[in-house]
Amino acid sequence: MKKYAVQFPTSGIRKKFQKALQSISSVSTREEIMTAVEALADHPRPFGEPKIKPPLIVYSFTAQYRIRIGNYRVLYDVDDSCNTVWILDVRKRNERTYR
């Protein structure tokens, strides 16, 4: 199986992701999130993590997948044509996460 590149679609989204990550008070949760994001290179569709239905629009991009890390969700999309995982957002799980 080919490795996927884990990237952000724009530098602005990267900055927003990093800012949201820094706002998480627990260092261990931040490390878990980064480990999970890096693991997407080997397994872009982890077992037990269903597709988001319907897909979410995040900064004009479509998030079709999510991974759960405690009370947080990393929203992303997979482009198999260029073997890339596009990281779009990290959100605290609440009633507005999937809107």
Image: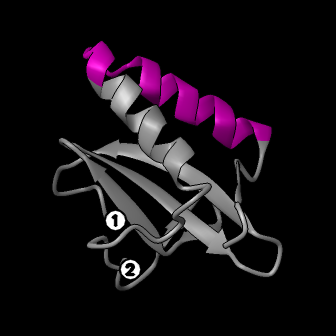
Could you classify mark 1 by the number of other residues whose Cα lies within 10 Å: few (under 14), some (14-19), or many (20 or more)?
few
Tally the numbered discs: 2
Residue 20 lies within the magenta run: yes
Badge 1 marks a residue whose secondary structure is loop
On the rendered structure, is 46 left or right of 68?
Answer: right
Residue 36, percent from left and from top? 43, 44
Give the number of the mark in front: 2 or 1. Answer: 2
Q: Which residue lies furthest to the front in this view?
A: 1
Tell me which secondary structure the magenta stretch mostly adopts. Answer: helix
Could you classify mark 2 by the number of other residues whose Cα lies within 10 Å: few (under 14), some (14-19), or many (20 or more)?
some
Residue 70, percent from left and from top? 19, 42
Q: Mark 2 points at which residue?
A: 51
Please tell me which residue lies in front, 71 or 35. Answer: 35
Q: In this view, does 56 lie above or below 11?
A: below
* Residue depicted at x 66% and y 42%: 13
Q: Quadrant of the N terminus?
A: bottom right
Q: In this view, does 47 lie above or below 74?
A: below
* Residue depicted at x 77% and y 46%: 10
Which span is picked out in magenta? 11-28
Amino acid type, callout 1: Arg
Which disc number belongs to residue 99? Answer: 1
Please tell me which residue lies in front, 38 or 68. Answer: 38
On the rendered structure, is 49 left or right of 11?
Answer: left
On the rendered structure, is 62 left or right of 70?
Answer: right
Amino acid type, callout 2: Lys
Residue 14, percent from left and from top? 66, 36
Residue 76, percent from left and from top? 53, 61
* Residue depicted at x 38% and y 85%: 54
Residue 80 lies within the magenta run: no
Instruction: Tell me the distance, in whole angstroms, between the alpha carbons under discs 2 and 1.
Output: 15 Å
Q: Is residue 99 above or below residue 27?
A: below
Q: Which of marks 2 and 1 is nearer the N terminus?
A: 2
